Amino acid sequence: MAERHFDEELKLLKERLLQMASRAEEAIARSVKSLVNRDSPLAEQVIKLDPLIDALEIEVDEQCLKLLALRQPIAIDLRFITSAMKINSELERIGDQAVNIAERSLELVKEPRLKPLIDIPRMATLSQGMVKDSLDAFVNKDAALARSVCESDDEVDNLNEQIFRELLTYMIQDTSTISRAVHLMLIGRHLERIADHATNVAENVIYFVKGKTIKHHVADMH
């Protein structure tokens, strides 16, 4: 009976994490959409909804601590709960990065558009996909999917470098573009950080499934 109750508690914890991941993904999508469409109300919505992600983080953390204290889990259950705590923290930070993008979007709306946005939406799609895949890997105990998330990080880094170089050229050629270019550079940086957090989630999934701690050693994951 107690064991069944424990399984239900673990299931609830998983559901809460998925709920949080869904909110974080939505925040990324909306913040970038607000940037592309120059949509201030949408950017404000992202900022306004962030406390919901923060509240969920506290709830998940408390749930994890309660399970650790009352159930004293061992082996894979212990790894599941400790991984959930770390993943929870990464998701909250992803939400914060989406807020940062929304804030930059609000600043950019005040000025003329600098250039058509191509690489930033691509980066956003990749980063958002990494967040989704890392959580799917967690739920399905899929170490191979988690590994592929870690490998996707390079693509996001390369796009960010490309964006940086292109914007630098704008700034050198015309100093009136500096303010807008800096905002866009920072948005690239925020998206790169989202991809980094998704990679951290994936590394935690590999620890949970395989019992191996892997930090930034993709080659060791095979």
Image (cartoon, helix red, strand yellow):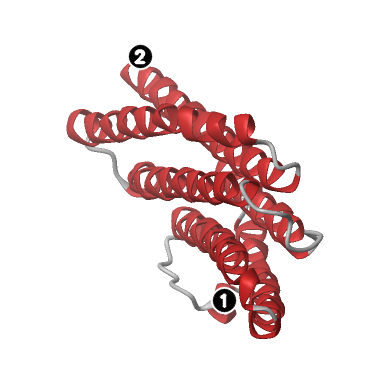
- Residue at numbered disc 2: 1
194 shown above or below 91: below
Horizontal and vertical percent position of residue 12: 45, 23
Which residue is nearer to you in this view: 55 or 110? Answer: 110
Query: Label 1 crowding class (10 Å Cα cut-off): few <14, some 14-19, many 20+?
Result: some
Which residue is drawn at the image coordinates 35% and 44% (left, top)?
85
For label 1, the SS is helix
> What's the mark number on residue 87?
none
Q: Is residue 55 above or below residue 25?
A: above
Mark 1 highlights which residue? 218
Judge by depth and name the residue closer to the eye, 51 or 151.
Answer: 51
Amino acid type at circle 2 is Met
- CA neighbours of label 2 inside 10 A, class few (<14), some (14 to 19), many (20+): few
Q: Residue at x 48, y 35 (%)?
A: 47
Amino acid at dot 1: Val
- Residue 128 is situated, as x and y percent measured from the top left of the image, at 66, 49
Secondary structure, mark 2, is loop
